[in-house]
Each structure stands twice: as structure tokens, then as C-alpha cells.
């Protein structure tokens, strides 16, 4: 039903995303309050603008050009999910590789695409020397449930740039 493969740099264009829907309607999120995580109502719609897509394309192209992985899921020739792992080690002992992106098109969430992409990213990271994946993860309750189901836990080390860029994200790690 779905076809999965790594993308070459030249394949990553704005056109690739024409049948991909990022939209996520969020009602509740995990929020850090003191030393505890709590669920809070925080309704919003997360979607990408044209400039967000252009930025994404340039980031994914750089990831591949630098030796990282961009793995994609296709249905009937259309992109319906992708994951990206950057090749630069992170952390005090260089034990992490960054799962820089993982997204599934809105209409196909819950059908195993995210799981398959995550497992591919984990396998690739382990084969490239990582002990753990690092994930600066969307705090939506549904997103966090996915990451927890994949074995992610709160990161022992937190990447300062990720925390500064996305202060509401949950910083996670997953052994590879």
C-alpha cells in the first residue's frame, strides 16, 4: 500500500509536497510546570505557509547533501510522510543523532506510516554511530502519545538551540 525510500537531494522540491497536508488541529498539549509535565488546553491549528514549505525544502536538501537521511512514504506516487535525520552528532558524548523532522499527511495519520518512518530513522541512526535519537517533539497530546509508543522518554541532555527555537516542544530521546 505504501512505498518507502530514501530521497536524493534533487527530488526534494516544493512540487514534492503538493499532495501533502501538514495541518494538525490541536486541542491539548503537554506543558512543563516546575518539575512536572501536565496536560493543558491550548487549542490551535498547526499548518505550514508557503514560506514554511520553502524553508523545509532547503533544510531537507541540506540534510541529504550533508550525508543525512530523508526517508519518504508514498501512496500512488504522492508523498504522504517523511522523516529526516541529520548526520552531525549531538550531546556531551556525541551520542545522539537528531530526528529533525517526521510528519505524516493529515488524511493518513494513524495508519502506521509514522511508525515505519520512525523505525527507519532509528535503524539509520544506529548504523551511523548514534546510541540515541534526539527529538524536539511537538507537545500536542497526540504527538506525544506517538513518541511514547515508540519508546521515547524525556531527554537526559537538552539541545540548547532546539529548546530556544521551540520552547513548548518536549525534548525526547530514544535508544537506537
Image (tube, grey):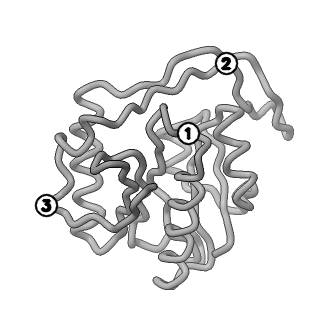
Residue 106, image x, y percentages: 48, 32
Q: In what element is the residue under mark 3? A: helix
Residue 147, image x, y percentages: 67, 51
Crowding near the residue tagged with mark 3, few <14, some 14–19, many ≥20 C-alpha atoms within 10 Å: few
Quick check: 163 above or below 119? above
* Disc number placed over residue 109 in the picture, else none: 1
Q: In what element is the residue under mark 2? A: strand
Instruction: Report the front residue among 8 and 38.
Output: 8
Q: Residue at x 58, y 61 (%)?
A: 134
**Alpha carbons under labels 2 and 3: distance apart:** 37 Å
**Alpha carbons under labels 1 and 3: distance apart:** 27 Å
Q: Is residue 11 left or right of residue 33?
A: left
Quick check: 55 above or below 171? above
Residue 104, image x, y percentages: 47, 43
Q: Residue at x 47, y 45 (%)?
A: 103
Q: Residue furthest left?
A: 10
Q: Which residue is mark 3?
A: 10
**Which badge, 2 or 1, is on the more N-terminal residue?**
2
Quadrant location of the N terminus?
bottom left
Q: Which residue is mark 2?
A: 27
**Which badge, 2 or 3, is on the more N-terminal residue?**
3
Q: Residue at x 66, y 61 (%)?
A: 173
Amino acid at each position: 500500500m505504501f512505498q518507502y525510500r530514501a530521497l536524493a537531494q534533487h527530488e526534494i522540491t516544493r512540487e514534492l509536497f503538493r499532495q501533502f497536508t501538514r495541518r494538525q488541529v490541536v486541542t491539548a498539549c503537554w506543558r512543563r510546570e516546575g518539575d512536572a509535565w501536565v496536560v493543558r488546553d491550548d487549542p490551535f491549528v498547526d499548518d505550514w505557509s508557503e514560506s514554511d514549505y520553502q524553508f523545509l525544502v532547503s533544510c531537507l536538501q541540506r540534510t541529504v547533501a550533508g550525508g543525512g537521511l530523508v526517508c519518504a512514504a508514498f501512496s500512488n506516487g504522492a508523498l504522504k510522510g517523511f522523516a529526516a535525520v541529520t548526520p552531525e552528532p549531538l550531546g556531551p558524548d556525541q551520542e545522539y543523532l537528531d530526528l529533525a523532522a517526521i510528519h505524516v499527511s493529515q488524511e493518513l495519520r494513524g495508519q502506521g506510516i509514522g511508525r515505519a518512518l520512525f523505525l527507519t530513522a532509528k535503524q539509520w541512526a544506529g548504523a551511523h554511530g548514534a546510541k540515541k535519537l534526539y527529538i524536539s517533539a511537538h507537545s500536542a497530546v497526540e504527538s506525544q502519545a506517538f513518541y511514547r509508543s515508540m519508546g521515547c522518554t524525556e531527554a537526559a541532555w537538552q539541545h540548547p538551540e532546539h529548546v530556544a527555537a521551540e520552547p513548548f516542544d518536549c525534548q525526547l530521546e530514544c535508544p537506537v
